[in-house]
Image (cartoon, rainbow, N blue to C red):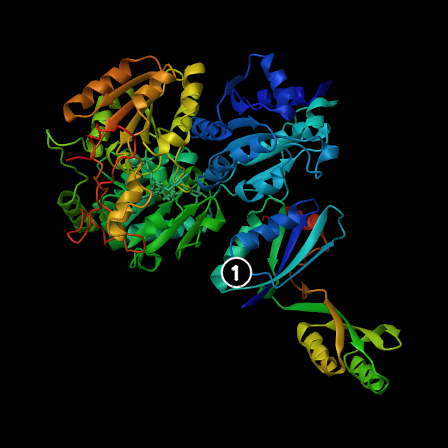
Amino acid sequence: MEHIISVLVENKFGVLSRVVNLFSGRGYNIETLCVAPTMDPSISLMTIVTSGDDRIIEQIVKQLNKVIDVIKVVDINESEFVEREMALIKIHTRQEDRAEALRITDIFRGKVVDSSQNSYTIEITGDVKKVEAAINLLQPLGIKELVRTGRVAIPREPARTTATQPKRILKEEK
Amino acid sequence: MKLTGAEIFLESLKQEGVKTLFGLPGGVVLKIFDVLHQQKDIEVILTRHEQGAGHMAEGYAKATGKPGVALVTSGPGMTNIVTPLVDAYMDSVPIVVFTGQVPTQLIGNDAFQEADNVGISRPCTKYNFLVKDVNDLAQTIKEAFYIAMSGRPGPVLVDIPKDVAMNKGDFRYPQSVSIRGYNPTYEGNKWQIKQAVEAIHKAKKPIIYVGGGAIFSNAHEELMEFAELTQIPVDMTLMALGAFPATHNLSLGMMGMHGSYASNMAVHYSDLVIAIGSRFDDRVTGKVSEFCPEAKVIHIDIDPTSIRKNVHVDVPIVGDVKTVLRELNAMLKATPNGNSIEQRRPWWNQINEWRTKHPMGYVQPPDAKIKPQYVIDRLYQLTKDKDPIVATDVGQHQMFAAQHFLLNKPRRWLTSGGLGTMGFGLPAALGAQAAFRDRLVLCIAGDGSIQMNMQEMATAMISKLPVKTFIINNHFHGMVRQWQDLFYEGRYASSYLDTVPDFVKMAEAFNAAGFRATKVSEVDDVIKEALKTDKPVLVDIEVDAYENCYPMIPAGGANHEMILEDPPEMKRGEKPASKVAGEDKDTVLTA
Ligand SMILES: Cc1cc2nc3c(=O)[nH]c(=O)nc-3n(C[C@H](O)[C@H](O)[C@H](O)COP(=O)(O)OP(=O)(O)OC[C@H]3O[C@@H](n4cnc5c(N)ncnc54)[C@H](O)[C@@H]3O)c2cc1C
Ligand SMILES: Cc1ncc(C[n+]2csc(CCOP(=O)(O)OP(=O)(O)O)c2C)c(N)n1
Ligand SMILES: [Mg+2]
């Protein structure tokens, strides 16, 4: 099963590679990976989408916890959560397709963030299903380039938060 | 107070109580060696190869329970010590390895003797550091020792660029460390311990499965109390030998691939496996799906990743063996279990039957070739009063030693289990001898393995480390030949080692003492000779080249499916011809 795992790590060089090495060295799968700073500049948040049966996910969480630069690990799937991904999609737009492109963008509440004589760049944000649906619909118009951020996720309240209050989290046992 | 990085290095090591350092110099660490040269608090043992330095640090750590320390240069110095790092990582040995690095401004430029030390060592250390500023050096060293020694022990590497060693900085040694992402759990969860007590009371066929964790935790007394209190039989892994006395009536000896018949039968048919600081390695479990099929499993381990990694666990207890066993013993004493001992009488009858059916034995006809088991047995009998430390290499001789050299105390057994590193024995023995100058340190070596770190005989001579090495010489990679007999129809592909070198002459070339035994009647004599000698000794013992090591659970077999002797369908290979010109004294292989 697919799991989204939030990992709070020290913001130091080499940490990304420690985490990625762990996955590659043990044959675990990384589907998407997102790294960004938190409100505390000494801490970064990694959001990893991975998959495996319960035993593998349990090992992944334990192994991540074991990495010394990892401060906290949350398996987001353990509770209700909200997830988002963003895609930037550059499509060919022949004159006759322009209206269709705009309509699709509109349906998905996307935005055209750049346009040229024969292209639009469309921004779509949403859960994976929505992003993929939009991509599927835009495909027939001719996608020139596609970039996706990979997913980020946050548990719904009331639940443990991930990165908003690092000070408090530090005191929790790992 | 302003000190150079090299001086800070020295002062920090002194603060950590380091007495011995194993190393080999090179350009970027000359400054540090220069500082070490001008002081007397820390003894520097110059090795002949960085791999030697790493294994010596491991031997030192295993024998003393204190961290072993090595210092090597950049580039090839670092890459040469990778094997000991991996070895220490697999076997949870606390060593701190310092490597030199090119000056900070050259890092990444493919400078002379530059290697990506932290990159290379990342997957083979518990943690590693690159020190970029001399003012961070003391703090880093403090953290390195703390990480190596706490929780599940392991190797830590500290990479020190040349300019960091030369520059001056403030020296203040930190009193404590706190690393927010690292807080090992020592106390076990009380509720889980209570579950364990209940399971123990209910069990009719329980077994204790002790691992190396009991030794790292210095928990032999607590373990003894636990076993005696509950009267539960004790199986040990290769890494646990000595954690519980082999001669104690509750001991069933080593378990696993080459473990005793009783130990493996007992674990297979048990209804409760109490794993104490052991990690369910595949050499112990055999076919995992058939490992102790009827048993509940209690697992005490300080590393949560060890728990449920390979097998299902019913009562997981994350914590330190010593701390948890104390708690467990206290609870057990508070709830008397008189009748549970009574209800296990049939279990003990069964175990005693297994014990007598296939004891760990061997046959040594007086006129036949020397059996390797006989050598180990005699070595054990003739040295046991001296409470020796025993190091081994890797192969059949290692397994024979594990089976026949009975150890009653912890930290007497230095062997490479997880990685199985040939060439581990001699340097590990030297490391232990450096820590305990007055004790008897033995190395039980294979003729193949010893050649992998033979150069350290020079270290033994120069640093006056009188290790007694006994080479169980079968002129083969014996363990490989055994598998070829059993699984490759006796085709001895690249396992014959021929008749060179002459180990006695080799010993003499180092100015050490060399002895040889080729007949059964000579074995006691050479052992006694070796023990009388003050110098390092190499004893070459020509053994039966075709002896195989049993019991054996073939890879992928279940624990009760042991092979106990050469199977009738086994095809013995042809005797390989010696390729040494003019060689005619190949007495070992000719019948
Ligand atoms: C040729 C060859 C043959 C072998 N045959 C056998 C065999 O027949 N039988 C056998 O047993 N092995 C055999 N081995 C060794 C085997 O490969 C493993 O190394 C060994 O079984 C592991 O032992 P262990 O479970 O005690 O784990 P160790 O590697 O000693 O690990 C210790 C465990 O204890 C935990 N721990 C550490 N400190 C603490 C603490 N303070 N408190 C609590 N827990 C702690 C660790 O987290 C870890 O899980 C063989 C090796 C070779 C090279
Ligand atoms: C560095 C290394 N290379 C290869 C092996 C594979 N291997 C395991 S045992 C063995 C043979 C060991 O021969 P020897 O030291 O003579 O011991 P014996 O089995 O003959 O007692 C080999 C090659 C290993 N364990 N380590
Ligand atoms: Mg051999």
On the rendered structure, is B237 left or right of B378? right
On the rendered structure, is A121 left or right of B510? right
Residue at 71% of width from left, 38% of height from top?
A: B109
Q: How many marks?
A: 1
Q: Quadrant of the C terminus of chain B?
A: top left
Residue at 21% of width from left, 39% of height from top?
A: B547
Q: Is residue A78 above or below residue B130?
A: below
**Can you give x and y, in whole percent of width and height, for residue B294 in the image?**
29, 59
Q: Quadrant of the N terminus of chain B?
A: top right
- Residue toward you, A84 or B20: B20
Q: State the image quarter where residue A89 is shown.
A: bottom right
Camera sees residue B411: yes
Q: In which quadrant of this rendering is ligand 3 seen?
A: top left
**Can you give x and y, in whole percent of width and height, for residue B565 in the image?**
18, 46
**Can you give x and y, in whole percent of width and height, for residue A57 in the image?**
52, 60
Q: Decide: few, some or many residues near mark 1? Use Cα within 10 Å; few <14, some 14-19, many ≥20.
A: some
